[in-house]
């Protein structure tokens, strides 16, 4: 037998927020996390679910929108694997009980609570599914697959999809990991002339927002958490609502307060930084309820925050 003394134990559970199978909710998955944590495992790396189509990337403002409008690849996955149940222009609400962002926020909060209230000392990680559950542009040619019984080969993901996973799932975890290095990160295809590993290395400096929120009811400045944010020179595009129901887009909004070691100080991913932005609006003009869209310049994906100060 192997000696496991002083070695850490990890587990990587799958999740499923789709309504095509067990119809599990975010609360069900939180209960599952609690059960696993109580086994005294050291690390729980939860699969995000998006690669297999088991969980979606969407913001609260997008729940009633067609999946195809926001994530056409996910829509294609749903048609391929749930052809009898899925419909044209089906919405996120029709397909899922929650989003990746909502799930990992809940798992992160539950993990924090368990660590504070018990002697459990586990870490929660995001397990990125770096593939698409399709067979349009596989790493291994399909004729070859037919000669390899039992081999399951699907499309690899793009660098943008990896960034999107971090945007929706990494704000409250201690680390991120992906499995199946070979072939998911090493192969080239007809569409992808460079491997995913090469694309990540070349594009490693691109900014990624992991979370966004208003500082407090008293200080309604936008705060962003993320990676690769270039401090004082990092610009942001901001879409905000006024009290008259109009929306305004402001470009090149910059930060004035920074915590570059935020991740380290808060037991999160070490490279996560905190930026509080200059107000792009007069506070008396900002609506008391609504949503904002924030996008870091040069990033692939935006972050959406909702707020309600009417009560």
Image (cartoon, grey):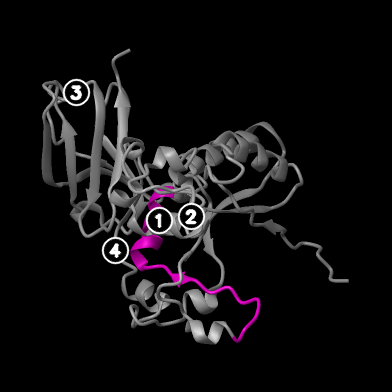
Residue sitting at x 31%, y 27%: 307
Q: CA distance from mark 4 to mark 1?
A: 24 Å
Question: Was residue 166 drawn as part of the magenta stretch in this picture?
Answer: yes
Residue for badge 4: 206
Q: Residues within 10 Å of mark 1 (few under 14, many from 20)?
A: many
Question: Was residue 247 drawn as part of the magenta stretch in this picture?
Answer: no
Most distant residue in the front direction? 84
Provide residue 175's location: percent of width, then percent of height: 52, 56
Mark toward the start of the polypeptide (4 vs 1): 1
Residue 276 located left or right of residue 47: left
Mark 2 or 3, closer to the camera: 2
Q: Secondary structure at mark 1?
A: helix
Residue sitting at x 36%, y 38%: 63
Determine contact: label 2, label 1, CB under 8 Å.
yes
Residue for badge 1: 74
Residue for badge 2: 53
Q: Give the vertical position of 148 relative to 56 (above or below).
A: below
Mark 4 or 2, closer to the camera: 2
Determine contact: label 4, label 1, CB under 8 Å.
no
Q: CA distance from mark 2 to mark 1?
A: 6 Å
Residue for badge 3: 287
Residue sitting at x 44%, y 43%: 101
Determine contact: label 2, label 3, CB under 8 Å.
no
Q: Residues within 10 Å of mark 4 (few under 14, many from 20)?
A: some
Magenta-tinted stretch: 147-168
Q: Is residue 214 visible?
A: no
């Amino acid at each position: 037998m192997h000696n496991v003394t002083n070695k850490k134990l990890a587990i990587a559970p799958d999740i499923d927020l789709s309504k095509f199978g067990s119809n599990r909710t975010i609360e069900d998955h939180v209960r599952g996390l609690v059960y696993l944590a109580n086994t005294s495992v050291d690390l729980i790396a939860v699969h995000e679910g998006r690669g297999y189509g088991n969980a979606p990337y969407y913001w609260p403002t997008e729940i009633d929108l067609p999946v195809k409008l926001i994530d056409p690849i996910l829509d294609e996955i749903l048609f391929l694997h749930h052809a009898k149940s899925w419909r044209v222009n089906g919405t996120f609400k029709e397909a899922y009980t929650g989003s990746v962002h909502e799930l990992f926020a809940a798992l992160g909060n539950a993990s924090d609570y368990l660590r504070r209230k018990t002697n459990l000392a586990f870490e929660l990680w995001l397990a990125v599914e770096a593939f698409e559950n399709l067979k349009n542009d596989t790493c291994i040619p399909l004729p070859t697959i037919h000669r390899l019984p039992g081999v399951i080969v699907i499309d690899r993901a793009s660098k943008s999809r990896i960034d999107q996973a971090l945007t929706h799932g990494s704000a409250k975890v201690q680390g991120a990991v992906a499995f199946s290095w070979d072939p998911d990160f090493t192969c080239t295809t007809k569409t992808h002339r460079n491997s995913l590993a090469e694309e990540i290395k070349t594009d490693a400096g691109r900014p990624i927002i992991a979370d966004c929120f208003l500082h407090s009811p008293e200080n309604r400045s936008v705060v962003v958490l993320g990676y690769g944010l270039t401090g004082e020179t990092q610009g942001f595009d901001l879409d905000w609502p006024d009290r008259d129901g109009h929306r305004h887009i402001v470009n090149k909004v910059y930060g004035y307060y920074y915590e570059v070691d935020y991740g380290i100080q808060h037991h999160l991913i070490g490279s996560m930084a905190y930026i509080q932005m200059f107000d792009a609006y007069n506070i008396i003009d900002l609506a008391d309820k609504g949503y904002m869209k924030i996008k870091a310049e040069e990033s692939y994906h935006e972050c959406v925050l909702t707020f309600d100060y009417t009560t």
